[in-house]
Amino acid sequence: MLSLTCPCCGITAEETEFHPGGEAHLKRFGPGSSDDDFEGYLFGRKNPKGVHFERWRHSHGCGKWFLVARCTATLEVFASYSAQTTTPPVDVIKAIKAKRPDWEGYA
Amino acid sequence: MSNAVSALNSERHEGFVTVSEAGLVGMITIRSDQASKPLVKALKDLGLSLPPKRGITEAGGLVLAWMSPDELLLICPHDQAPAHTGALEAALAKTHALVVNVSDARALMHVRGARADEVMMKLSPADIQQLPAGEMRRTRFAQVPAAFWRSGREEISVICFRSVAAYVMGLLEVSARPGSELF
């Protein structure tokens, strides 16, 4: 079972108290963008085995969105952090590197 | 004006703990920047201080609970709710804030008894044993959202939406049946 900590209210709870919101840090391509960019924005996902960045909502708690860095293979959570970030913060990257030295990094 | 009636008309069940609906209770949702000065002042006028994260403050029959980083819940006697709502609205008129009287959209239940925790443990994924007094815990009760706090010695109060009050009462009643104690 996945156990997450909401950075907005500080509660640590198991995943049924939250709702997943898909991959984090997507760049939106809207009206005026090329078809390829738009398709990539809609359907192109990293879907890695290993370190992954996700959006979650504390739907049965404070109701806020936040982001989580976790391992899709082991369910290990490296960090949860504010949704108001466009790329993973430095301390989150550091926390992941400490546990997964051979991780290729966020690109 | 029509008579206000609570969701379950103070329904009550005796199991290894007593489960009862609280009847009419006033609840006011305040959505605002919690650090905003007009809000802090308006609460001070009610004798209330701003609760810490997930905390609860009480004064003179009023309970103020931290619900999320931009949301507070004021629990008061049902007949006082319109007046408090009006006063808070007036105080926050010039700020980006929302005050709504949600008394009739919610239900409040009490679970009373030495084993009240065990009823909660059956229904919610929250870590009940670690729940301190004076903390509002918003979580899930089986399939619906709920919030609860330790409102007294051996008493836990549960807030849920009025539309699911009968469902939550059913959950509590079944979970409190004698012979189904956890420990």
Image (cartoon, coloured by chain):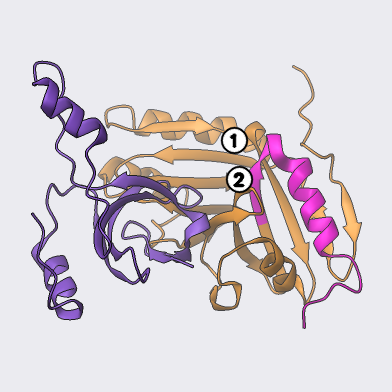
Magenta-tinted stretch: B158-183
| Residue B21 seen anywhere in this rendered image of the structure | no
Residue designated by label 2: B76
| Residue A37 seen anywhere in this rendered image of the structure | yes
Residue, x 55% and y 56% (percent of image)? B139
Would you say the residues marked 1 and 2 are in contact, meaning their CB atoms lie under 8 Å apart? yes
The reply to the same-chain question for discs 1 and 2 is yes
Q: What is the x, y in percent for residue B180?
A: 85, 72
What shade does chain A have?
Answer: purple
Quarter of the rendering containing residue A70: bottom left
What shade does chain B have?
Answer: orange
Q: CA distance from mark 1 to mark 2?
A: 6 Å
Label annotation for residue B81: 1
Q: What is the x, y in percent for residue B8?
A: 82, 40
Quarter of the rendering containing residue A53: bottom left
B31 or A107: nearer the viewer: A107
Q: For the view shown, which residue lies furthest in the bottom direction?
A: B183
Residue, x 25% and y 57% (percent of image)? A48
B104 or B140: nearer the viewer: B140
B145 or B160: nearer the viewer: B145
Identify residue type, mark 2.
Cys
